[in-house]
Amino acid sequence: MIKSVNIGFLYGMVIGLTIGLFKVPYKIVESGDGVSISQNVDFIEYIIPLLRVSLVIGIVGAIVGLGIFIKNKKNMDKP
């Protein structure tokens, strides 16, 4: 059981990290009076939301891994 939950969590973390790399903004664009200003976000302000996204998806992956384990266990118990 622990193995399937750990694998689900790790796969979820990797998938969450890749999704977070595309979804978490790394620069702020402000526009006004026909001029747009682009500022890069500090590393710590970028990495915290990125880790939050990957952890949430990792937890979802662990829940999915647990569900798969329970489903497989029920199928093995049937005669």
Image: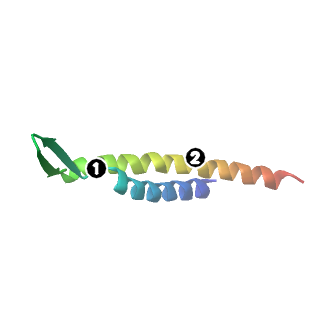
Residue under circle 2? 63
Q: Foreground: 16 or 3?
A: 16
Q: Secondary structure at mark 2?
A: helix
Q: Residue furthest front?
A: 34
Mark 1 element type: loop
Name which quarter of the figure residue 16 lies in.
Answer: bottom left
Type of amino acid at the residue the image marks with label 2: Ile
Question: Which numbered tag is attached to residue 33?
Answer: none
Who's the residue at 82% across and 52% down the image?
77
Name the foreground residue: 57 vs 22.
22
The residue drawn where x is 58% and y is 46% is 63
The residue type indicated by label 1 comes to: Pro
The residue pinned by badge 1 equals: 25
Lower position in the chain sequence, tag 1 or tag 2? 1
Of residues 6 and 40, the one drawn nearer to the viewer in this rendering:
40
- Label 1 and label 2: CA atoms lie apart by 28 Å
> Horizontal placement of 16 versus 75: left or right?
left
Q: Residue at x 49, y 54 (%)?
A: 12
